Image (cartoon, rainbow, N blue to C red):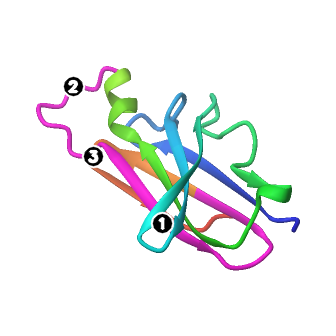
Amino acid sequence: MAGRLTTHVLDTMHGKPARGLRLELLYVHGDHTHHILDSYTNADGRVDQPLLEDDQFQLGEFEIHFHVGQYFERLGVELQTPFLNVVPVRFTISEDSHYHVPLLVSPFGYSTYRGS
């Protein structure tokens, strides 16, 4: 397969890429998940390598856990009661193609879509 999976995180509170945000990739199998990798975003809000590519790329259901609470806390964003902690994004890879899962996030909301 020649497909790959990438991500990009933008901090909409500060209007910049989310540098140093921890994320986890999981493979969903029925009612349980298998941990594939942990990574951190770089200065551009991206992970240095694709999350999946070459022999690791496969069809199926996946989930990325974005640790946004930890990210905003590290930046010193003071919230009396944090609203978001971990943002899980579950999606299905159904074809041998490039899948890009961006996240736009603030301490109080997020959005995602299938990017290119």
**Mark 2 crowd level (few <14, some 14–19, many ≥20, 10 Å Cα):** few
Magenta highlight range: 76-101
Residue extending farthest left: 80
Q: Which mark is on residue 113?
A: none
Tag nearer the camera, 3 or 1: 1
The one of 45 and 29 positioned closer to us in this rendering: 29
The one of 40 and 72 positioned closer to us in this rendering: 40
The disc, 3 or 1, on the residue closer to the chain's N-terminal end is: 3
Q: Position of residue 103 (x, y in %)?
A: 50, 53
Under mark 1, the amino acid is: Arg
Under mark 2, the amino acid is: Glu
Q: Position of residue 51 (x, y in %)?
A: 69, 49
Tag nearer the camera, 1 or 2: 1
With respect to residue 82, does 28 lie above or below?
below
The one of 31 and 69 positioned closer to us in this rendering: 31
Would you say the residues marked 1 and 2 are in contact, meaning their CB atoms lie under 8 Å apart?
Answer: no
With respect to residue 27, does 96 lie above or below?
below
Q: Mark 3 points at which residue?
A: 84
Q: Mark 2 points at which residue?
A: 78
The disc, 3 or 2, on the residue closer to the chain's N-terminal end is: 2
Mark 3, secondary structure of its residue: loop
Q: Mark 1 points at which residue?
A: 90
- Identify the residue at horizontal 26%, vertical 48% (top origin): 108
Q: Where is residue 72 in the image (x, y as percent from the top left)?
A: 35, 31
Q: Position of residue 69 (x, y in %)?
A: 32, 36
Tag nearer the camera, 3 or 2: 3
